[in-house]
Each structure stands twice: as C-alpha cells, then as structure tokens.
Image: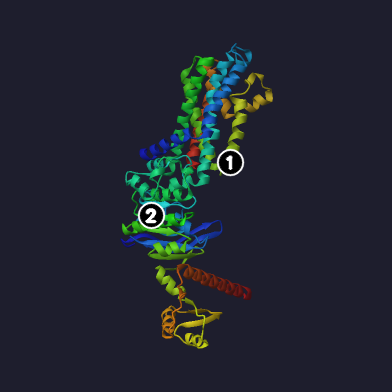
Amino acid sequence: MSAADVVKVRGLRKVYGTRAVVDGLDLDVRAGEVVGLVGANGAGKTTTVECIQGLRRPDGGSLSVLGHNPVTEAARIRRLVGSQLQDSALPDRLRVAEALDLFGTSAASNGRGLLEQFGLAERRRSAFSSLSGGERQRLFLVLALLNQPRLVILDELTQGLDPAARRTVWASVRKLHESGTTVLLVTHELDEAEALCDRVVVMRSGRVIDTGTPAELVDRYARTAIVRFSLPDFPAVILDELRRLDGVRDVERTGSRVTVTGDRQIIAHVGAALVRRGTVPADFAVSIPDLEEAVLKLLAEAKAADESLRAANELVGGRR
Amino acid sequence: MTGTVGRLVSAELKLMTRDPLVLTFVFAFPIVTMLIIGGAFGTQPDRAFDFVNPAHWYVASYLTVVIAATGLVMLPVHLASYRERGVLRRFAAAGFPRWSFTIAQLITGLVTTLVACTLLLVVAAPVYGIPAMHAWWRVAAALALGAVAFVSIGVLLGSVLPTARSAQAVGLLLFFPSFLLGAGGPPPHVMGSVVREVAGPLPLTLLTNAVRQPWLGIAPATGSLVAIAVIAVVATALAARRTTL
C-alpha cells in the first residue's frame, strides 16, 4: 500500500446466507480524493463501506484503511473515520448540543462552528425527534466531521433533503475536499456524484464494473449528443445536408421540429450549418449526456453481458 | 475508557429522566401500587404476613418491584428500540467500543434503580413508616445482587429481542406474573399450594424473600440470597457475552 492510499481493498467478499453481496471487490481511495460508490440497490455499496469501517466482518479478501486492518483494529479505525450511516438514528430525546458532547472526543473541533456552518445553531436545544429530515442529515454530517477525521464516509448523504439543503451539503463536501480530507461517498444520486466526485466507482452484483472520473465514464459510455431546434419554413434540402454532416447518426423531423442525434461533434457542425444557411433558431437546444446516462448504459451493458454468460453456461451445462 | 463510558452514562441518565416509560413504570407505578396495597391490609400484624405489619411487609417488598421494572421492562425496551432504529450502529460507527455500551447500560440501570428505590422510601416514610432493618447487610447484599441480576437480565433481553414492541410484550409478560406472585401481590400464605409452588422459584420471589425476610426479622433467607447471587453471576456473564453493538 502506498503512503497515498487511504483505503485499499482487494478481493473483498461478504456473504449473507448463500448470497454473495460483495464478491471479489477491489477498491482504492487515495488521500484527498472524493470517491463516489454508485450502483443499483443491492449492488453491495453499503456492505462494502460497513466492512471498511469494521462494522461487518468480511468473509474473504484484504482491507487496509489508513494503514490499519478493519477486522483486527476496528476501534482504532473508527476513531480516524467520520461516518454518516444510512438508516441510523440518534436517541429521540437527545438534544443537538448533547449529541455533540456525546460523540465529540478529545480531537473534537469547534462543534458550535459546525452547527453554525450547517444551519443548526438555533436548534442546539432541540431534541433529535423534533428535527426535520434535512436537519437530521445535517446533524449527522456535523457529527461525522466533529472529530476532524482523516477519512469521511457518507452513505446516502442527501437522502430526503430539499434542493436548497442539498446544495448546502454539497458546498460542505467541496470545502472538505479543499481542506484535503478524503471522502468516500455512497450515493444513488448520480448528479451528486458528478458534482462532487473526483472518481466514480460503479458497482453491480457486489463487484466493481468500471471506474473513472465522471467525464471519463461519460466519454466511455454516453458519447451521444442531441440537438433540437424548430424551423417554421423548412427547405427539405437542409435535412439532407444535416444527414451528411460528420458524426450525425439520425435526423428526425416532426412538423417544424428537428432532432439531430450523433457524436458530440455534431453540436458544432449543426450550428455551423444553420449559420451558413443564415438562420439561427431561437429554440436551438443541446442535450449532452451526463453521468446518469453513462452509468445507466454501463449497468445495462453489464446486465446484458451477465445474462449472455448465464445463457451460455446453461447451454454448455445442458449439452453435458 | 472512562471518557467513553462516562459520556454514555451521562447522556443515558439524562435520557432516562425524559422517558415517559421510565417515569411511569419505574418511578410512579411501584409507588402508587405500594401506597394502595400497603393501605389495603391495614397496619396490624397478621398471621398471613408472618406476624408483621402488612404495610411494612409491602414497603420492604416494593423495592424489588422497582428493580424488576427496571430489568424486565425499562432496559429491554430501551435497548431493543436502539437496535431497531440504528442507534447502536451509530454508536459503533462512532468508535464506542462494544463493551462500553453494556457497561453504560448496567451503570444507568443501577443508578435508576437506586434513585427509584430512594424515592419509594421517601414517599413511604410519612405514610406507613420505614420498618427497622434486622439484618441490614443481608438486605443491602440482596438489593445489590438483585439489582445486578435484573439489570443484566434486562440487558440480555434487550440484546435478544429484535424490536421495541417485542421487548415490551415479553417484558410485560415476564413482569406482571412475577410482580403478582413474587412481590406486590397477595402474601404466599394466602396462595393455593400450586400457585405457591409456581411462585417459589421465580427470580423476583427469591429476591423479595432475600430482602423482606432479613429486613423484617422473619428469617435470614440465606438460600434465596445465594440463588440471587448465582442468577446475578450467570445473567451478567451471559449479558456481557451476548451484547453486541
């Protein structure tokens, strides 16, 4: 493990009953990175981070977190890691300020400052049960950051938050990133992963199926761009001209509405072609694929590949 | 270590004072029922009460009701609720060692018992008077061992039962028969032989005997005291082994 590796996982395996929830997973998180763990429900994301925190004992593989083994040194790791867990709570009648006293260790930073930063200063005397969903999530984030951890694990960070609260929390994660804290972010929200993560790890059926920066994943799996515009007096010759442009795969016309699909280069080519014709439609719009489209395509490809493999295995098994 | 347990105990004690179940079941219920039943049989020594003042009989008995309410109802519901809602997971993830929560619960349970027993005696004193203790050290030993035994049983039940509702159901099912047969109900002398046979080996009956008999000078109740000591050791060992975060 290099000095820069905060998390190094090799061949992680975790089985519940007869089902392998995590099956040979490899994962590296380097110091100062924000890494997103994404995938469908049941992909094994939460189990993976629970093994990393030493909350679950793996059935196979090796793990190293900040140079320590989560199986044998769980208590030490938990003191260095701040976490915001999915599906957890605080005692109903515990007040916000008391939660800071309870969870703050000698390493605790300025709890009052964190409460102010996350808009909870006026709720210091409020019981946990009286907080809204967004306030609870923000309190969990405060608790995760309270002891100045070297690694922060955030599981479904913005679940249940309204858009404004999400933006506040995102800004806090960016601040963490700027301060050099390493963040492992488990999320279903791919816009969140795209906005916050240096690197995204895509999981399916307990394995990593690809990893890269959001831009790399989009480039790999979703290169299509769509250009839409309207031309009321539309000479048919333009359609042929658009079809001949480099990178264009399809041109569709519905009434005065035109949709051009192709590689990203079509954005420039279609725009230039329209300008050459002396027309710039007011509703000219471009759809560029985002991480969500890329990940959905990747997951669909992985599912199709799994099904083909299963069918082939069944065929071979049947012949035998 | 002290810091972790200290922070947990401090928080848990504050939470206990805000919990309606604790306030009603551990503090109010024993006091109210003691006042009612203590007055029901008068204050004249009676054969059914081993020739002691019936009110004093119940004052001495009801300390064990507090202990049983803490161990059989309050702690299991509290712990199962924590497990069900993911509070224990949060403590674990925050680096609280597995044993620290168990120790904190044992301490919290014992402190709650001590406060509730004191309150019961404070209320009983002006109404029925506090009976003189004939063998204080036996009474003190029985109360201490009984508190450890029932608090450990509570921690054990809380670690086994999956939800707060199941803990409440099981806890009440264990508590009320024990309460009626072993501490707060009719004296054994007026029970039928079968009921007396059933009541005799119940932990709460043994504890009540170990407290009441030496307190009121009826008997030393050494057998009951030894039985409670054994239960305390076994229950504590099982609770320590079983409790996981």
Tell me where residue B122 appears, x and y as whole percent: 48, 20
* Mark 1 neighbour density, 10 Å: few (under 14) some (14–19) many (20 or more): some
Judge by depth and name the residue closer to the eye, B134 or A214: A214
Locate residue B91 relative to residue B77 in the image: left or right: left
Chain ID, mark 2 = A
> Label 1 sits on what residue type?
Arg
Does the image show residue B223? no
Q: Is residue A151 above or below residue B171?
A: below
> Label 2 sits on what residue type?
Val
Disc 1/disc 2 C-alpha distance (Å):
34 Å
Residue at screen point 50% across, 16% down? B125
Identify residue for label 2: A152
Image quadrant containing the N terminus of chain A? bottom left
Q: Is residue B76 above or below residue A67?
A: above
Chain ID, mark 1 = B
Identify residue for label 1: B165
Q: Is disc 1 in the same subunit as disc 2? A: no
Badge 1 marks a residue whose secondary structure is: helix
Residue B7 lies in quadrant: top left
Badge 2 marks a residue whose secondary structure is: strand
Image quadrant containing the C terminus of chain A? bottom right
Tell me where residue B135 appears, x and y as whole percent: 48, 17
Tell me where residue A23 appears, x and y as whole percent: 49, 63
Does the image show residue B56? yes
Residue at screen point 47% across, 18% down? B136
